[in-house]
Amino acid sequence: MRTKIETIKTTTIKRGLMRLAALLLLLPLLCNCAKEPINRNIEGHWKLERFTILDTDETVTCERIFWGITRAGAKLFEKQGPHGYASLDALVEYRKNETVLVFKEIFCGERLATKEELHPYGLNHAEETDFQAEE
């Protein structure tokens, strides 16, 4: 008799643990915690092909320059390019009903980027740069 009860208890415990394990495995699928982009027209990976310097109206053509923009940050980098430009990181925020993207504090490593480091990416100010989204 004693053996039957222990076997029944062990089987019941195993079933309960299997159900709990299955629930724990399915829980991440049921709870989607991915953060949606604030503005899908802006966020993503972009290849910078050219930019115009407004003061001189000069258009600069870029080689293998990329911007990766997310809801909170941006990564600016040259991918396998010939110049060896420094990679930059920027804090990002939106303003004016999510139509203006602001790069705040653009860093090269642990320090603010210099104008020379910003120029290949079409930027000239490391502390704050605004971009107006166009339709």
Image (spheres, rainbow, N blue to C red):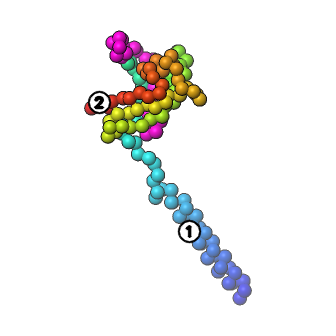
Residue found 68% across the figure and 79% down from its top: 7
Foreground of the two, 48 or 113: 113
Three-letter code, disc 2: Glu
Based on the picture, tell me whether residue 77 belongs to the magenta stretch. Answer: no
Residue bearing the label numbered 1: 19
Q: For label 2, count other residues whose C-alpha is less than 10 Å away and answer few (under 14), some (14-19) or many (20+).
A: few
Looking at the picture, how far across and down is residue 83, in whole percent?
53, 15
Please identify the quadrant where the C terminus is shown. Answer: top left
Position of residue 3 relative to residue 19, above or below, is: below
Q: Residue at x 48, y 34 (%)?
A: 91
Q: Relative to the observer, which residue lies in front, 58 or 115?
A: 115
Residue 74 shows in this picture: no
* Residue 134 numbered mark, or none: 2
Up-down: is 81 above or below 68?
Answer: above
What is the magenta range? 52-74
Mark 2 vs mark 1, foreground winner is: 2
Say which mark, if any, is on residue 76: none
Dominant secondary-structure state across the stretch colored magenta: strand
Question: Where's residue 133, x and y in %?
Answer: 32, 31
In the rendered view, does 59 fall on the left or right side of 33? left
The residue positioned 46% from the left and 57% from the top of the image is 31
- Could you tell me residue 96's position as x and y percent? 32, 37
Kindly tell me whether residue 131 is visible in this rendering: yes
Residue at disc 2, secondary structure: loop
Mark 1: amino acid: Arg
